[in-house]
Amino acid sequence: MTRNISDLTVLITGAGRGLGAAIARSFAQQGAQVAINYRHSRDSAAALVAELGPRTAAFHADVTDPAQVSAMVAAITDRFGAPDVLVHNALADFSFNGDARKRLDQMHWADIAQQAQTAVGGALHCLHALQPHFAAQGFGRVILIGTNLMQNPVVPYHDYTAAKGALLALTRTAAKELGPLGVTVNMVSGGLLRSTDASAATPEAVFDIIAAQTPLGQVTTPAAMADAVLFFASPWARAVTGQNLIVDGGLVFN
């Protein structure tokens, strides 16, 4: 089964700002109904809804809490119908600042667990809430947001990268299990994005160094990442599942 993007209802976690907001804009521009999940970014989520119009709405939930996720999905279903697409973009509090990062000898399991709770736990909770709908209609699209730091840990953010590595594993195992239901599960992995709240602490010189190392000579933007997410939800990706697409201007060849 394939569906046009304009026929889809899309849930985007962590969509009140940054990359999530860019993804919401891309889906809205293609006519989809867009559910904007936020945890703390209430005002920016409301502003995004006002910008994008009546086929969008904001829904509060902490994705680490399965009860909140279930309540959010119920509210989305009341408003738009059950989501056909999950884009799991939510990120635990994090700042891409290489100088301020914890070194390995300062790292504790709790640091990794905190990142994994949102990256992996949040994805799992959303899948639990959405799988019955996917199964009932024989269709679903799941896009998880990863990182090219797994292929090229140019800055060793141990906690963040470990959690995204676990999320990639879940991408592949979920693709195997959900495929018979008509559900595809894929990951889009960006490099350092210019710019989001998480990358705001990155010195401008670092952006310039990365841009110089890419074949395209530029740092990836949230809008460019959003284009790749849109592809996995589109009819053109109907036979693609369990894959990790790196979107970083060619910094990493995979």
Image (cartoon, helix red, strand yellow):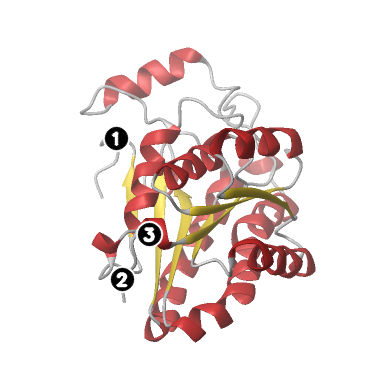
- Left or right for 100, reference 11: right
Residue 90 shows in the view: no
Q: Nearer the viewer, mark 1 or mark 2?
A: 2
At 79% from the left and 69% from the top, the residue drawn is 67
Residue 231 placement (x, y as % from top left): 32, 53
Residue 113 placement (x, y as % from top left): 69, 57
Residue 191 occupies which quadrant of the picture? top left
Q: Nearest the camera: 118 or 81?
A: 81
Q: Which mark is residue 251?
A: 1
Q: Mark 1, residues whose alpha carbon is within 10 Å: few (<14), some, or many (≥20)? A: many
Question: Which residue has dot 2 on it?
Answer: 2
SS for dot 2: loop
Label whose residue precedes the other's in the sequence (1 or 2): 2
Label whose residue precedes the other's in the sequence (3 or 2): 2
Q: Identify the amino acid type marked 3.
A: Ala
Real-space CA distance between mark 1 and mark 2, rounded to the nearest whole angstrom: 32 Å
Q: Mark 3, residues whose alpha carbon is within 10 Å: few (<14), some, or many (≥20)? A: many
Q: Identify the amino acid type marked 2.
A: Thr
Real-space CA distance between mark 1 and mark 3, rounded to the nearest whole angstrom: 25 Å
Question: Which residue has dot 3 on it?
Answer: 233
Residue 43 shows in the view: yes
Q: Nearest the camera: 234 or 104?
A: 234
Residue 165 placement (x, y as % from top left): 49, 57
Q: Identify the amino acid type marked 1.
A: Leu
Label whose residue precedes the other's in the sequence (1 or 3): 3
Residues under numbered marks 3 and 2 in contact, where contact means CB atoms less than 8 Å apart: no
